[in-house]
Amino acid sequence: MIPRWSLWATAGGTAASAAALAWTELTLPAQPLISDYALVAGGLVPVLVGMLALAGACLSLAYGLVVADPARTAATRVLLLAGAAGLMLSAVFPTDPGSSQIGTLAGEIHRWAAAVVFTALPVAGWTFARGRAGAARWNAVRAMSVTAGLTLAAYLAAHPATVTSPLINGVAYYGPLERAVVLAEMVLLVTMAVAAAAGRRVSARAESAPAHSAPASPAPAGSAPAGSATVGDASAEGASELAA
């Protein structure tokens, strides 16, 4: 489906974002949430790089889907663009310090933009795989979409701002859950790109498969050429592979 450059751009942007996240986790003082690293010395640049690289991955996948299958992937592309926009807004508008008792406008924009990102990407994965055949690549997209959605639900339940957090002692582990959501959505993006690229390879194989014609023999009047049935079977097989 998608061009090869779209696959590599999506995978590369996601890998760069994961590397930036790993850098902050390993070299900077521990923070409750990923966005909080932007408020400590040396943390702003890797946080910005991570967010913008992941936004670029969303955009490259969306553009690849425009080239490959514009009609069927419209909802998926809108959600990917929403995720990219949320990441860029999160990069531009910093979060409020955890010790702050008053929320700023920038902090509110950051929080709502992050909420859009966390919600849009699992739904994008699900809509992308919806209605596809039960091939392994589509099952992987569905599984990662569900995993990202369930991890997000656990994170929201544990977040200190929710009423459920005191009931489950969420303050103790809501930070690791946020990182789990981010990693799940990174894997989901790459899984979507690989699934789309695999569809492209299946299509190429179907188009390049030679048609095996029957030995030449006199054809009865009014009948179709002997090779036409075989060509039709090959076309049907190619169509079934594309549906997978």
Image (cartoon, rainbow, N blue to C red):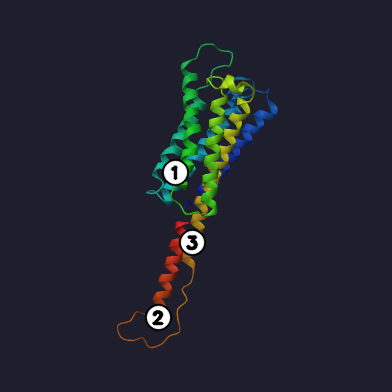
Which residue is at the front of the view, 81 or 191?
191
What residue appears at the point 63 percent right and 36 percent down from the top-left corner?
Answer: 19
Distance between the alpha carbons at the discs numbered 1 and 2: 43 Å
Q: Which residue in the protein does label 1 denote?
A: 127
Q: Is residue 39 visible?
A: yes
Give above or below for 158 relative to 215.
Answer: above
| Residue ranking furthest to the top | 101
| Vertical side of 36 occupied by 238: above or below | below
Extreme-front residue of the structure: 167
Q: Nearer the viewer, residue 203 or 176?
A: 176
What's the residue at 56%, 44% (across, down)? Answer: 11
Q: Nearer the viewer, mark 2 or mark 3?
A: 2
Q: Is residue 96 above or below residue 73?
A: above
The residue pinned by badge 2 equals: 226
> Nearer the viewer's eye, disc 1 or disc 3?
1
* Residue identified by numbered label 3: 204
Q: Position of residue 124 (x, y in %)?
A: 46, 40
Badge 1 element: helix
Mark 2–mark 3 Cα distance, whole angstroms, equals 25 Å
Kind of residue indicated by mark 3:
Ala
Q: Residue furthest bottom?
A: 218
Mark 1 vs mark 2: give the one in front: 1
**Label whose residue precedes the other's in the sequence (1 or 3):** 1
| Residue at 45 percent of width and 32 percent of height | 85
Q: Position of residue 194 (x, y in %)?
A: 54, 49
Q: Is residue 4 visible?
A: no
Task: Name the kind of residue labelled 2 in the image.
Answer: Ala
Which of the two discs, 1 and 2, labels the residue nearer the N terminus? 1
Residue 155: give x, y in percent of width and height: 56, 28
